Image (cartoon, rainbow, N blue to C red):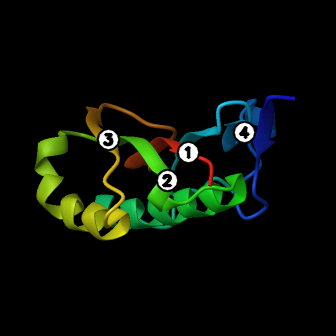
Amino acid sequence: MRKQLVNPPQRYDGKPHGLSHAVNDTASGVVYISGQVDWDMNFQVSSHTVEGQLKNVLNNLTIVLDAAGSSVENLLNLRIYIRGELGEFFDDIAPILAQFLADSRPAITGIGVASLASPETLVEIEAIAALK
């Protein structure tokens, strides 16, 4: 089989919503990671600031990368969605991203949006990575 579903037990159950947290394409060695948000197992956010949610989202992204057999160093692409005008948050989020990504330096697109997965969700990140 070429498609391997990845759903780490530390993340909420996406099956009722028809999603997996990631899908490995075992033929190409690429992992596609669903948008990660700051949700606990009950779909509740733990922070109400962009910076706080970004840190939690990056932690969740790491959990999914590890479960998929990848890592931050193997990230190829990130799409970062921020509720509101991205430029208003850029100076606050850039240092958090730079520290998290270190020398990985994947291709990144930042997008300001009107809404995300829930009214409390301020940050969502989807990613593509190579398998180790």
How many circles with numbers are drawn on the protein?
A: 4
Where residue 74 is drawn, which disc sits there? 2
Disc 2/disc 4 C-alpha distance (Å) = 20 Å
Give the residue pinned by disc 3: 107
Residue 13 image point, x, y percent: 77, 49
Give the residue pinned by disc 1: 130
Badge 2 density bin: few <14, some 14–19, many ≥20, Cα 10 Å: some
**Does 107 appear above or below 95?**
above
Q: Are marks 3 and 4 in contact (CB under 8 Å)?
A: no
Label located before the other in sequence (1 or 3) = 3
User: Could you say which quadrant of the image residue 99 lies in?
Assistant: bottom left
Q: Are marks 2 and 4 in contact (CB under 8 Å)?
A: no
Label located before the other in sequence (3 or 4) = 4
Give the residue pinned by disc 4: 20
Q: Are marks 2 and 1 in contact (CB under 8 Å)?
A: yes
Label located before the other in sequence (3 or 2) = 2
Badge 4 density bin: few <14, some 14–19, many ≥20, Cα 10 Å: some
Please tell me which residue is depicted at 72% across the width and 64% down the height of the picture.
10
SS assignment at label 2: helix
Residue lying at the far right of the rendered structure: 1
Label located before the other in sequence (1 or 4) = 4
Please tell me which residue is depicted at 15% across the width and 53% down the height of the picture.
90
Residue 32 image point, x, y percent: 59, 37
Disc 2/disc 1 C-alpha distance (Å) = 5 Å
Disc 1/disc 3 C-alpha distance (Å) = 13 Å
